[in-house]
Image (tube, rainbow, N blue to C red):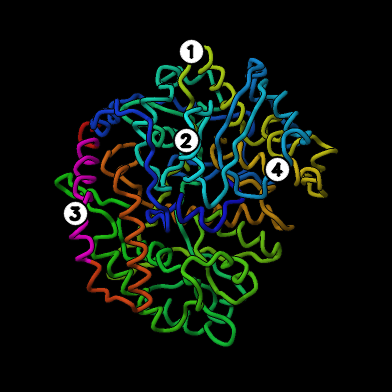
Amino acid sequence: MTGMSRRTFLSLSTAVAAGAAATSLTGCGSAAKKTGEAASAKVKLPSYVPFTKIKPDLPPNAKGLSAGFLSYPDKLVRSVAKTPGDGSKVTLLTEIWTQPPTPKGSNAYWEKVDKALGVDLTAILGTDPGYEQKFSAVIAGGDLPDLLWIPPNQGIQHIAELLEAKCADITEYVSGDAVKTYPNLAAMTPAHWKTAVVNGKIWGAPVPYPAFGQVYAGNPKVWAKTDGIQASGTEEFLDKCKEVTGGKTWALEPIYVNAVNVLCQSFGAPNKWRQNKDGSLTWFQETDEYTAALDFVVKLKKAGVFYPGDPKMADAYIKMAQGAIGATVHANPYNARNDIRVQDPELASEIMIPFAAGGNQPHHHYHLGTIGYTAIKKGDEKRVRMLLRVLDYLAAPFGSKEREFLEYGAEGEDFTYDKHGFPSRTKQGKQQVEGLYSGLQTATTSPFALIASSFPGDERAQDVKDVYAAEQKLIETAVRNPTVGHYSDAYTQHYGRMSTEATDLVNDIVSGRKKIGEWKPFWAEWKNKGLEQMAREFQKSIEKSA
C-alpha cells in the first residue's frame, strides 16, 4: 500500500490507534450472537495458490520475506481471463491516501476502469483522517454500498452485527479450493484471509500489506558521526542520540507512543499478546518489558533528544529528510526507505534493527499482514460472484497487464516509460489515475512485493536489495501476534477507547505530566473494564482451533 499518511500507520499498523474515537454503528440489527470467538476458530480458509507467471529476482519465503523485483518485466502477462462485470452499477466505499482524482464525469481513466471491470463504478472516497465518520454516515444512510472497505483499527465498533445483518457471507465461494475460481484472490496467503474472518465466516477480500511491523529509519547524514543508527544496546543508543542532537537537529521525532512501540521490541515485549504456558494471554502494554521500554523513552526525553514538537506532528518525515530530525518511525521496512525517498529521492534512509535490551532477546513484531478487507453487500449468488470477480481483477499481481493498467492507466496518455523502463505517470495520470487507484488499491490488492518501480530516485534496484536485506535480519527475531485469525467481541467493543486512553497516558508520562508509576495501575483498572474479557475470548478461540 503506497501513499499512506502519517496518521495511517498510527491507526492501521499499531496497537494504539492514536486519537481514534469509537464509532457505534446503528441500524444493523442484533442477530450476531456473542459467540464469534468460538465460531471463528473453525472456518476453513481458502487454499493458497501463488502467482507464478512472473518470477521475482529475490524470492519470498513462508516467514514473510517479501518477493523482490529489481527491474520491470519486458513482457506483461494476463492474470484475468475475461471482463469480470455484467454491466451493472457498482458502488464502492473506500479510502484514498492522496489527492482526490478528477471526478468521474471528466476522468478518462475512470471510464477505462469501468470498461475493464465491466461495471458502472461509483466510488465513495473517504479521506485520512475522517474515514470512520464517513463509514458510519454511509451505513446510517441505509443504502449500503455493494463493496465496503472495513479497516482493522479505526475505532469502528459492532462490525460483526453489520456483517451479519447486511453483508454477504462468502465462505462457500472462497473456502478451500473454491477460491481457485478467483486466481488472484487465491494468491493471498492464509494469514491474509484470517483477518477477514468474523463469527466463523469469511466476509471479504483481504487487503495485503507488508508482513513486517514498525521500525526506525535514520537519516544517514545525521548519524554519520556515530557510524550509523545501529546500536548494541540502550546505553549505546542513548549515547548516539545525545551525540547527534545539537544545533537545529534532534535525534528522534516526538511521537512518543511509536518510540515505545518500536523500542519495546528491543526489550522483548510480545507482539500485542503474550501466550503464557497455561494458555492465558497477556496484553503487551501491561508487561514488564513494555514498562521498561516506556521508562527508557522517558530517559530519552529527559536527555533532550526528541524534537520539541507535537506528539501527533504531521511533518516529521519532511523534517527528517531536511536533517532537523535524525530518525522517524515507519510502518514497516519498505516505508522506512520509501517514505523518505519521496521527500528526498537522493536520501537512502538506514533501517534500524532491534538491539537487545533489559537482558532480553529482541522481538521484532510482525504486522497483521493486511489493512482490513472489503466486504460485499448481501445479494443473490450471481451478484456476489460477479463482485468477487471484480475484486479478483483489483488483486492483479505485479507483472500483469491488469496491474499495470490499474496503477498507471493507458500508455502515452496516463504514463510513459522512463529511461530505466519503469512506468511514470504523466500530468494527466497524476490528476486522473493516482487518486482513484489509491482507493481501488485500498479495496484489495495483490500480496506485497518489493518492486523497484515503486521507489523514487535512481537507486531503485538498490532500495529493493537494502529493504530485502533488512527484512532478512528482522526475520531472525520476528514474532507473530497469536490472536491473528481469532475473534473477540470484547476487543471489538473496548479496543478503541482503551488504546486512545493508553496513548494519552504514554504522552503524559513521557512529557512529565504524569509519573511512570501510574502505568501499571492503569492496566489493573482496564482488566475489569474489558481487557481480561478480551484475553479470555481470544484464549477460547485459540484453544478450539488447536
Instruction: Give the structural element (helix, strand or loop) at label 2.
Output: strand
Front position among marks 3 and 4: 4
Image coords of residue 533 (percent x, y): 20, 45
Residue sitting at the far left: 278
Label 1 secondary element: helix
Reading the image, the residue beneath label 2 is: 373
Cα–Cα gap, marks 2 and 3:
30 Å
| Residue at x 49%, y 30% (from the top left corner) | 205
The overriding secondary structure of the stretch rendered in magenta is: helix
Q: Which residue is mark 1?
A: 381
Residue 527: which numbered mark, if any?
3
Is 324 on the left-hand or right-hand side of 61?
A: right
Disc 2 residue type (three-letter): Tyr
* Residue range (magenta): 520-541
- Spatial CA span between label 2 and label 1: 20 Å
Q: Position of residue 449 (x, y in %)?
A: 57, 43
Q: Is mark 4 in CB contact (under 8 Å) with mark 2?
A: no
Type of amino acid at the residue the image marks with label 4: Pro
Instruction: Indicate the amino acid at tag 3.
Output: Lys
For mark 2, does the 10 Å Cα neighbourhood hold few (<14), some (14 to 19), or many (20 or more) residues?
Answer: many
Upstream in sequence: badge 3 or badge 4: 4
Q: Within the image, what quadrant is residue 503 found in?
A: bottom left
Res. 435 image quadrant: top right
Q: CA distance from mark 4 to mark 1?
A: 33 Å
Distance of label 4 from label 2 (alpha carbons): 22 Å
Mark 4 = which residue? 101
- Reading the chain from its start, which is encountered first: label 2 or label 1? 2
Question: How far across and how far down the image is residue 465, in percent?
Answer: 60, 54
Find numbered disc 4 in the image and state the secondary structure of the residue it sits on: loop
Residue 490 magenta-highlighted: no
Q: Earlier in the sequence, mark 4 or mark 1?
A: 4
